[in-house]
Amino acid sequence: MINYDEAFGLDVVEAMKSGTQVIAMNRGSMSELIRDKETNKG
């Protein structure tokens, strides 16, 4: 789990692109990349 502020979150984008589930805290850019119950639906 990412527990630090990251400027963009490239590792999160790469994980989502490969279909890997992502768990992150609502910090930094994570709230812009991950939307609860919306993002990365199969």
Image (cartoon, rainbow, N blue to C red):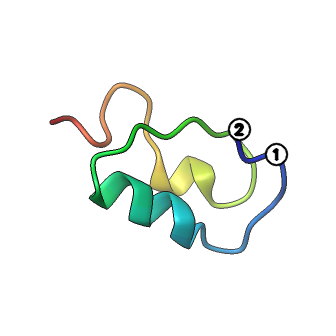
**Left or right, residue 10 beside residue 20:** right
Residue named by callout 2? 25
Q: Which amino acid is tagged 1?
A: Asn
Total of numbered circles in the picture? 2
Label 1 neighbour load within 10 Å: few <14, some 14-19, many 20+: few
**Left or right, residue 39 beside residue 34:** left
Q: Quadrant of residue 36?
A: top left
The residue lying furthest to the top in this view is 37
- Which quarter shows the C terminus? top left
Q: Does the CB distance between marks 1 and 2 fall below 8 Å?
A: yes
Q: Earlier in the sequence, mark 1 or mark 2?
A: 1
Residue 34, position as x, y percentages in the image:
47, 45
Nearer-the-camera pick, 2 or 27: 2
Residue named by callout 1? 3
- Which quarter shows the N terminus? top right
Residue 31, labelled with which disc? Answer: none
Q: Which amino acid is tagged 2?
A: Met
Residue 10, position as x, y percentages in the image:
53, 72
Residue 39, position as x, y percentages in the image:
32, 41
**Residue 4 vertical position relative to residue 41 in the rendered view, above or below:** below
| C-alpha separation, residue under disc 1 versus residue under disc 2 | 6 Å
- Residue under the image location 74 percent in, 67 percent down: 6
* SS of the residue under disc 2: loop
Nearer-the-camera pick, 13 or 19: 19
Nearer-the-camera pick, 19 or 7: 19
* SS of the residue under disc 1: loop
Q: Quadrant of residue 13?
A: bottom left
Q: Quadrant of residue 25?
A: top right
